[in-house]
């Protein structure tokens, strides 16, 4: 079955550590996206990528970095520069003109 | 930037009743999409309505779009406990780089048995 896989489901880190969230899709979609969701709130765009080796900052990119070395993969690194990293992170993909397909998210807790 | 704004923020109804959620947006759009999110999960696409459509149906879902008022509504008829979830509207927007999607804050729907 085609879909998007995010791993791990839960992630715990100490403050000051970088952490990388995985996102893999086998839908052959060109575009991939990372969103952050805080409790009871909507989604805010962190980064998005339309093609391999290219990506664009979203509304809240500070403290985050991404790479797109393969079409299927779009990992997100939460760096120690991110002031408030505890959140629910959602990865999504789409074809041009089509709706988003989402993974089931990674809940990151930084203490 | 938040474009879509849903209201109400939270809605609690009894099973069998209808639930109506509204979404407003700010810029011109090609289409508007509604998504559902169960607690702790990813979003699932429900329905897409194009800017030249006024109403669309899918099962128990009915979506309307009023481009003159920049608003949309999602109606769930004969609600079930399994409809309990958060519902979001999203609008695609295009910049020099490509297309991204802007989501509203969502409506949390609770359907009580």
Image (tube, grey):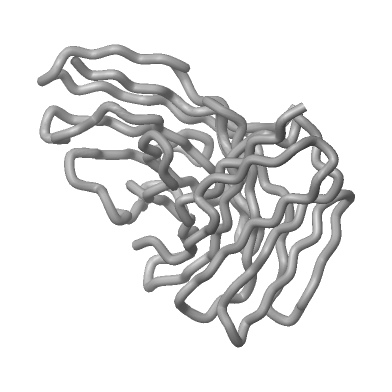
Task: Judge left or right: residue B59 versus residue A12.
Answer: right
Task: Judge left or right: residue A84 versus residue A27.
Answer: left
At which x and y percent is residue B6? Answer: 52, 58
At which x and y percent is residue A27? Answer: 66, 39
Q: Toward which corner of the image does residue A89 lie, by quadrant?
A: top left
Q: Residue furthest bottom?
A: B68
Residue drawn where x is 11% and y is 34% of the image: A81
Residue B110, compared with residue B107, is above or below; it is: above
Q: Is residue A28 visible?
A: no
Front-most of A107 and B113?
B113
At which x and y percent is residue B50? Answer: 71, 72
Quadrant for the C terminus of chain A in the image: top left
Front-most of B76 and A66?
B76
Task: Judge left or right: residue A107 versus residue B50.
Answer: left
Q: Toward which corner of the image does residue A103 lie, by quadrant?
A: top right
At which x and y percent is residue B25? Answer: 50, 71
Quadrant for the N terminus of chain A in the image: top right
Residue drawn where x is 52% and y is 42% of the image: A92
Q: Residue furthest front?
A: B14
Q: How many marks?
A: 0
Residue drawn where x is 56% and y is 26% of the image: A5
Q: Is residue B38 visible?
A: yes
Q: Residue furthest right?
A: B59
Residue drawn where x is 73% and y is 36% of the image: B83
Task: Judge left or right: residue A7 versus residue A79.
Answer: right
Residue B106, compared with residue A21, is above or below; it is: below
């Amino acid at each position: 079955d085609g879909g998007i896989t995010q791993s791990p489901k839960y992630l715990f880190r100490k403050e000051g550590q970088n952490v990388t969230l995985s996102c893999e899709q086998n839908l052959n979609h060109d575009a991939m996206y990372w969103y952050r969701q805080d409790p009871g709130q909507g989604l805010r765009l962190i980064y998005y990528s339309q093609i391999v080796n290219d990506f664009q900052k979203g509304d809240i990119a500070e403290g985050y970095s991404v790479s797109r070395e393969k079409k299927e993969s779009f990992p997100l690194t939460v760096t120690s520069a991110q002031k408030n990293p505890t959140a629910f992170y959602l990865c999504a993909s789409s074809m041009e003109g089509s709706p988003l397909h989402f993974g089931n998210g990674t809940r990151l807790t930084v203490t | 930037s938040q474009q879509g704004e849903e209201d109400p923020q939270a809605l609690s109804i009894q099973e069998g009743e209808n639930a109506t959620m509204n979404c407003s947006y700010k810029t011109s759009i090609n289409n508007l999409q509604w998504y559902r999110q169960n607690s702790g999960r990813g979003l699932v696409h429900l329905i897409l309505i194009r800017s030249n459509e006024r109403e669309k149906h899918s099962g128990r879902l009915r979506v309307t779009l009023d481009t003159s008022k920049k608003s949309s509504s999602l109606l769930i008829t004969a609600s079930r406990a399994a409809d309990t979830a958060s519902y979001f509207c999203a609008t695609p927007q295009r910049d020099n780089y490509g297309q991204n999607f802007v989501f509203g804050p969502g409506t949390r729907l609770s359907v009580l048995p």
